[in-house]
């Protein structure tokens, strides 16, 4: 299979303009004849639903939650990037593009990333117009801060709740369209499968989570905005309902899955503290602007932090990366933290933590300033750990946070399954092997507000779409399969709960397909995952019935998909015999333990094709070429 | 340092909207004080599943106090007794060995119980649909810095916008009123120049929607602001009252 | 007109009506209190005050009509709110707890309100709607407060009124949107002061009268 990314011709800065011109337009009067199914109401889904409805399309929007506002995007803390260059510190569209490509360790498409940087400014304009209360300077103009991995201030923020405020803006826009009757909302619905009719995505099968009813919805196109799959690891910073189900079902229906092994481990999370722990909490990366990361110089030093004199502390990031210091990109920071802990210098009860210390910043700026910047984060930390970060340094450890991999999409955000568009974290598009801080919000909103309205129109106008109805046999068959699967889950009646099995799967992935990987471990993990999956279907216990609100059943369905998907992650990691970004294979590192890419063999996107339950998937390749950002070894020294 | 404690839970169980429901008493042992309240419920549920019982249904998602999914009434207090804390952030170190904890769903006519601790809060979405937004189509926004907003205004707008829509204000209000929720959105948008053009229409429409959903009226008991996990102040309720007065008597809006 | 009805019929509209009529009662209480003070001037002064009031004729009637209208609005709206609020939570909580917002005064508003209503009716028939002769108003008051049970009743009722004022006062400001972080502490202080003034100012009167005459 040849993967055609459909990158428009012409010079990089004009590609998007030109493409918009070349895309066919749907006659305004015809728009209302098209029904679009949008799955998910995070930044990507809410913004897409609203923008499409504003154009006049009929939109049906689905989400798992009781309200669209609760999508996982709500939890994003730190901020959103744009190339406004308000601080006059040398930013530009080109620099944002450059930083993102480089930050992604050269595993993203130049054309996509450039478009993202171009659109970034319009996103800020739009969100401000919606009433997003971004932070302001004294004169009333917008404030910026610098954020993980960037040497300039291009991040817009609303306290530590930027995702919440952006999502509420998009949610408001969505609710406006719902009130106008152009969007029909289907909350508390889980999409269990995509319906393919004559080679095109034409519908979805949804389970009404309140009463278990299996519903079929037909449309002219499906827009999947279901977020990332970080919860494969069980413990992650993702919300509990985040899952891979819809994306994975789409993969099984013919959409290729790209770079599943690219996961981002965020360096600053609250460390794990017990087996019952259900999720990890992120401490925003912005904390690294003022906090200093350190460990005791001597392994096994168990003294409390304030008893360790300055001379016996190792500020290892500042030492190793003098020019970026504590602000090195996430993958670099995370790996270094792990390395220190592996050397026995970790702190806390488990030894799996390092200090993030604000004492200097408080001394320099005063407590009030620090409180204004990070008050809510400090409070959150104290609530969870019972420690006061104004007094004792925070303890942090890396945690799974974001997944760069996702369904493969072309420049139009369409997957290899015709009519299936994928937006936001669910696609693989813009972040390569590592995402820079504050650029997921940017990408989700770029996709939803400013890309899909054009490219979907182009698809609808340029593709003959015969009418289908939910009575088409494809719907009945897909619905039957979904229902059958639920019944199978209930029928096992074994001895382990879905969470218990999920926790074990997570441990396997974390240990062998996490921050650092090696071939032997990956091979072992693959075997372990296969065994676990087999055990899952033999020994899982799901109480209750499928015709009721049954949260265990919901969970079990998602875990079942993670069980299969995990193997794809491992396979992808095994095949990529290089290190890049979030994928660090121990066999490929420089003398200073930096990731060593192999651009000869792996300067490409790996996209996996499903070939049936008993066969290995096939790996396809989309070569990447870098004409504008020279392929260099990243260095943050 | 973590310890373990024993608790007696009295939990509301209700199979469905039509079921009358009842309290069930559950003894739990070995609760680590490092657990969150929801993790404690997870542990109870895991055990019940293995023993063949029905797990307790409760809404949750982010588990870090921002999505607004979680919430139950713990010993008479929505989200429990800790100020400025959602249930998912409430940790068991705030309970004592031997405590009895009564756990009930949020109660309001506008929030019918769906199952156990899960309630239907879609009324809050209907309130937002009535006008909790700025009507701006994608693509039509001016350059972001053309409208300066004094930082203190932006901050006050943010204070209101911090609402997570959990509904605890309604649950805590002796009248099951949604004034704090509604006023937070009215106030957030009324404070910003971007929200002014529609301010009059918005406040009147949202008040109407609030009444139509079957919420009670505000008696200024202040239970809402004391309960709100984001500590949103009733100063916003006063602003709603003011905005509504202005809109009702001075604007052409009906 | 339709707009006004629907505006005043809304939840906030009803509360405005409570606030505005409440303010009227506060004004009335202040005036009543000033009038009461004449009782300490002795029989002549108090009877003179009563006559002065009667001599106002139509103006007095206008005020009375105004007060009755306010009372009707305050009572019917209050009852409506009370019933609606009860209906808004058909199933209550097993454990009733407060986060610290409710006060004795806010909790009891509907009940203190009803008690005050009953008391006002009694009070009117007791002192206001009575023939001017043969007993003068001073004699009636003096006679009434020689009976300890009436002193107790009047004093107790003034505490009830004070409770109602305690919450009603600041609440009325909040309801019409007069809430400012700078001034709200003053308003809170004032409502407490008004409550004490009511309780002590009115409540001490029967006791003092009983002691003096
Ligand atoms: C704690 C945290 C902090 C972050 N901070 C930042 C930050 O500061 N800056 C930044 O740029 N990025 C940040 N990110 C990343 C960013 O928040 C996410 O990548 C982004 O919000 C994803 O948005 P989305 O719209 O793609 O998906 P989501 O917001 O995850 O939404 C997914 C939606 O899909 C629905 N859904 C999922 N599966 C199904 C199904 N099967 N059926 C029906 N509906 C389904 C869900 O209900 C939900 O509505 C952060 C992430 C985390 C975890
Ligand atoms: S689970 Fe999100 S706020 Fe509690």
Image: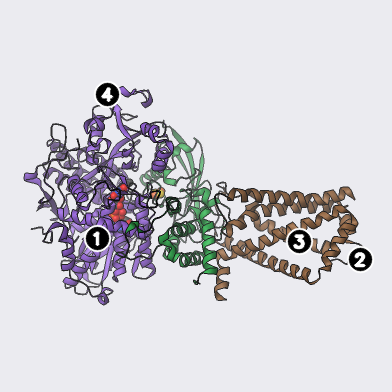
Chain colours: A purple, B green, C brown
Chain letter for mark 1, please. Answer: A
Q: Nearer the viewer, residue A434 or A99?
A: A99
Residue appearing at x 38%, y 61% in the figure: A172
Q: Nearer the viewer, residue A103 or A479?
A: A103
Residue A564: mark: none
Question: Disc 1 versus disc 2: distance between alpha carbons?
Answer: 92 Å
SS at badge 1: strand
Q: Are marks 1 and 2 in contact (CB under 8 Å)?
A: no
For residue B137, above or below residue C200: below
For residue C197, above or below residue A379: below
Q: For the residue carrying disc 1, how many other residues have a C-alpha within 10 Å: few (<14), some (14-19), or many (20+)?
A: many
Instruction: Give the number of the mark in front: 1 or 4.
Output: 4
Instruction: Give the number of the mark in front: 2 or 4.
Output: 2
Instruction: Give the number of the mark in front: 2 or 3.
Output: 2
Disc 3 target residue: C120
Residue appearing at x 34%, y 70% in the figure: A182
Residue A299: mark: 4
> Relative to A185, is A28 on the left or the right?
left
- Indicate the position of residue A329 as horizontal and vertical percent values: 23, 41
Disc 2 target residue: C133
- Cβ of mark 3 under 8 Å from ligand 2: the answer is no
Q: For the residue carrying disc 2, how many other residues have a C-alpha within 10 Å: few (<14), some (14-19), or many (20+)?
A: few
Q: Residue furthest right?
A: C134
- Indicate the position of residue A595 as horizontal and vertical percent values: 15, 38
Residue A193: mark: 1
Instruction: Give the number of the mark in front: 1 or 3.
Output: 3
Question: Disc 1 versus disc 3: distance between alpha carbons?
Answer: 70 Å
């Amino acid at each position: 299979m040849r993967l055609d990314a459909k990158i428009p011709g012409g010079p990089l800065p004009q590609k998007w303009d030109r493409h918009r011109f070349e895309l066919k337009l749907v006659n305004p009067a015809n728009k209302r004849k098209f029904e679009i199914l949008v799955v998910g109401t995070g930044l990507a889904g809410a913004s897409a639903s609203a923008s499409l409805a504003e154009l006049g399309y009929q939109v049906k929007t689905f989400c798992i939650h009781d309200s669209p506002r609760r999508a996982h995007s709500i939890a994003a803390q730190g901020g959103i990037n744009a190339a406004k260059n308000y601080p006059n510190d040398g930013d530009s569209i080109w620099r944002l593009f450059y930083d993102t490509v480089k930050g992604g360790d050269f595993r993203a498409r130049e054309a996509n990333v450039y478009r993202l940087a171009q659109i970034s400014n319009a996103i800020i304009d739009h969100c401000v117009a919606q009433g997003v209360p971004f932070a302001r300077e004294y004169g009333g103009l917008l404030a910026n801060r610098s954020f993980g991995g960037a040497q300039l201030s291009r991040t817009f923020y609303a306290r530590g709740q930027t995702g919440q405020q952006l999502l509420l803006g998009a949610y408001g826009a969505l609710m406006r369209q719902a009130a106008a009757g152009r969007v029909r909302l289907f909350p508390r619905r889980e999409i269990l499968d995509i319906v393919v009719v004559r080679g095109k995505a034409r519908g979805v099968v949804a389970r009404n989570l309140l009463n278990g009813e299996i519903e079929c919805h037909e449309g002219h196109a499906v827009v999947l905005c279901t977020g990332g799959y970080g919860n494969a690891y069980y413990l992650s910073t993702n919300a509990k309902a985040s899952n891979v189900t819809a994306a994975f079902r789409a993969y099984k229906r013919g959409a290729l899955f790209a770079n599943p092994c690219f996961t981002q481990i965020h360096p600053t999370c609250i460390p794990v503290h017990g087996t019952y722990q259900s999720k990890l909490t992120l401490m925003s990366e912005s904390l690294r602007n003022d906090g200093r990361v350190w460990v005791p110089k001597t392994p096994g030093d168990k003294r409390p932090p304030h008893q360790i004199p300055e001379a016996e502390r190792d500020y290892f990031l500042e030492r190793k990366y003098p020019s970026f210091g504590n602000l090195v990109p996430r993958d670099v920071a995370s790996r270094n933290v792990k390395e220190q802990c592996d050397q026995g210098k970790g702190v806390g009860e488990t030894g799996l933590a390092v200090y993030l210390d604000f004492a200097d910043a408080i001394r320099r700026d005063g407590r009030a300033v620090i409180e204004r910047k990070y008050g809510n984060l400090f409070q959150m930390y104290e609530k969870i750990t019972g420690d006061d970060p104004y007094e004792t340094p925070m303890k942090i450890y890396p945690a799974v946070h974001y997944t760069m991999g996702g369904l493969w999409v072309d420049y139009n955000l369409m997957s290899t399954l015709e009519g299936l568009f994928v937006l936001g974290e669910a696609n693989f598009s813009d972040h390569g092997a590592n995402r820079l801080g504050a650029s997921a919000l940017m990408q989700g909103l770029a996709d939803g507000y400013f890309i899909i309205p054009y490219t979907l129109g182009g698809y609808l106008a340029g593709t003959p779409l015969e009418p289908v109805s939910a009575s088409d046999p494809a719907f009945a068959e897909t619905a039957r399969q979904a229902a059958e699967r639920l019944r199978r889950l209930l029928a096992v009646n074994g001895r382990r709960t879905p969470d218990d099995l999920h926790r074990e799967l997570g441990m396997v992935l974390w240990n062998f397909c996490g921050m650092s990987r090696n071939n032997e471990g990956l091979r072992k993990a693959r075997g372990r995952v296969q065994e676990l999956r087999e055990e899952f279907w033999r020994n899982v216990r799901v109480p209750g019935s499928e015709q009721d609100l049954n949260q265990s059943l919901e969970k079990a369905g998602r875990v079942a998909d993670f069980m299969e998907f995990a193997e794809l992650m491992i396979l992808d990691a095994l095949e990529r015999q290089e290190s890049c970004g979030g994928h660090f294979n121990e066999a490929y590192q420089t003398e200073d333990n930096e990731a060593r890419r192999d651009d000869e063999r792996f300067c490409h996107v790996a996209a996996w094709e499903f070939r049936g339950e008993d066969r290995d998937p096939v790996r396809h390749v989309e070569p990447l070429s870098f004409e504008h950002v020279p392929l260099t070894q990243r260095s943050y020294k | 340092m973590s310890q373990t404690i024993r608790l007696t839970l009295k939990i509301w169980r209700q199979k469905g909207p039509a079921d009358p429901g009842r309290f069930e008493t559950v003894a739990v042992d070995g609760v680590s004080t490092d657990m969150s309240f929801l993790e404690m419920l997870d542990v109870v549920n895991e055990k019940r599943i293995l023993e063949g019982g029905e797990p307790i249904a409760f809404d949750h998602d982010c588990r870090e106090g921002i999505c607004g999914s979680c919430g139950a009434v713990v010993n008479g207090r929505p989200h429990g007794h800790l100020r400025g804390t959602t249930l998912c952030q409430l940790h068991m170190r705030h309970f004592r060995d031997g405590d009895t904890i009564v756990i009930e769903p949020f109660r309001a006519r506008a929030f019918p119980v769906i199952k156990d601790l899960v309630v239907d809060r879609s009324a809050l979405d209907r309130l937002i649909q009535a006008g909790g937004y700025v009507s701006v189509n994608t693509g039509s926004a001016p350059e972001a810095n053309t409208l300066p907003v004094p930082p203190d205004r932006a901050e006050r707008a943010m204070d209101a916008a911090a609402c997570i829509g959990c509904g605890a204000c309604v649950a805590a209000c002796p009248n099951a009123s949604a004034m704090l929720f509604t006023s937070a959105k009215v106030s957030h948008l009324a404070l910003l120049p971007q929200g002014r053009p529609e301010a009059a229409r918005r406040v009147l429409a949202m008040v109407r929607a609030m009444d139509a959903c079957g919420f009670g009226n505000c008696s200024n008991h202040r239970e809402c602001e004391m309960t709100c996990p984001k500590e949103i102040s009733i100063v916003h309720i006063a602003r709603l009252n003011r905005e509504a007065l202005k809109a009702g008597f001075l604007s052409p809006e009906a | 007109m339709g707009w006004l009805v629907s505006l005043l019929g809304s939840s906030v509209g009803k509360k405005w009506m409570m606030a505005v009529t409440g303010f009227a009662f506060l004004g009335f209480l202040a005036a009543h209190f000033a009038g009461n003070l004449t009782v300490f001037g002795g029989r002549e002064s108090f009877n003179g005050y009563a006559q002065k009031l009667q001599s106002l004729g139509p103006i007095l009637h206008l005020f009375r009509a105004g007060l009755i209208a306010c009372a009707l609005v305050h009572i019917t709206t209050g009852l409506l709110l009370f019933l609606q609020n009860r209906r808004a939570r058909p199933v209550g909580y097993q454990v009733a707890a407060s986060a610290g917002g409710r006060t004795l005064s806010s909790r009891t508003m509907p009940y203190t309100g009803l008690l005050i209503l009953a008391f006002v009716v009694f009070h009117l028939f007791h002192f206001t709607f009575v023939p001017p002769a043969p007993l003068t108003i001073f004699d009636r008051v003096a006679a009434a407060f020689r009976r300890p049970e009436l002193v107790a009743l009047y004093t107790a009722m003034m505490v009830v009124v004070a409770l109602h004022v305690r919450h009603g006062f600041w609440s009325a400001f909040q309801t019409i949107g007069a809430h400012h972080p700078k001034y709200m502490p003053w308003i809170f202080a004032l409502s407490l002061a008004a409550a004490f003034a009511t309780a002590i100012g009115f409540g001490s009167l029967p006791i003092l009268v009983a002691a003096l005459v």
